[in-house]
Image (cartoon, rainbow, N blue to C red):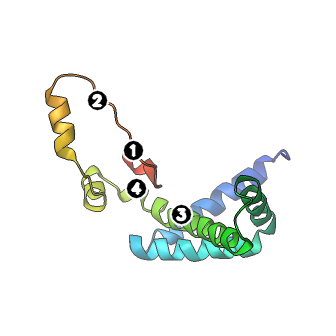
Amino acid sequence: MAKRGKFQTNLEYYAARLLLGAVGLFPLSTSMKIGKSIGRLLSRYLPRLTKTGRRNLEIAMPELSESEKKRILNGTFESMGRHLGFVSHFDEFTPEKVREIVEVIGMENFEKARSSGRGILFFTGHFGSWEVFNL
């Protein structure tokens, strides 16, 4: 990887901050839609990144058709864009706000296990935006 100078690092940092700030001016749902659009644009205007994603899909899932690989790759860019919209609102996320947007299923199982006085081991899926839980 090429070594970056301080000027380039600062330029990229402030560009990212400006983008996050601008996207974050809108309500969360709108920010996520804007982010999704940004993700689509990046897939079109960053051909090296798209080429890398396509090659990774060829290696990981060679049995998929070209149309399926394209669908997955487009979905990946859209998802990254939605996360941009989501991250732009991180400063607003309080524990109360997170409880409004996250559904917890099976809390009674947790309470029952906790009352036993023994340790608890969690297994969970990862569907994105895990950063929210580090509040």
CB atoms at circles 2 and 4 under 8 Å apart?
no
- Which label belongs to residue 91? 4
Q: Which residue is mark 2?
A: 120
Q: Secondary structure at mark 2?
A: loop
Which amino acid, by three-letter code, is at mark 1?
Thr
Please report whichever mark, 3 or 2, sits nearer to the chain's N-terminal start: 3
How many C-alpha atoms fall within 10 Å of the one at disc 3: few (<14), some, or many (≥20)?
A: many
Residue 62 or residue 97, whichever sits in front: 62
- Which label belongs to residue 27? none
Q: Which residue is mark 3?
A: 84
Which residue is at a point 76% across and 68% down the rendered structure image? 46
Q: Secondary structure at mark 1?
A: loop
Q: Nearer the viewer, mark 4 or mark 1?
A: 1
Q: Position of residue 77 (x, y in %)?
A: 62, 67
How many C-alpha atoms fall within 10 Å of the one at disc 4: few (<14), some, or many (≥20)?
A: few
| Disc 4 from disc 1: Cα separation | 25 Å
Q: Position of residue 75 (x, y in %)?
A: 59, 69
How many C-alpha atoms fall within 10 Å of the one at disc 1: few (<14), some, or many (≥20)?
A: few
Which amino acid, by three-letter code, is at mark 2?
Ile
| Disc 2 from disc 4: Cα separation | 30 Å
| Disc 2 from disc 1: Cα separation | 13 Å
Q: Nearer the viewer, mark 1 or mark 3?
A: 1
Which residue is at a point 33% across and 31% down the rendered structure image? 121
| Disc 1 from disc 3: Cα separation | 23 Å
Residue 69 or residue 78, whichever sits in front: 69
Which amino acid, by three-letter code, is at mark 4?
Asp
Residue 76 or residue 68, whichever sits in front: 68
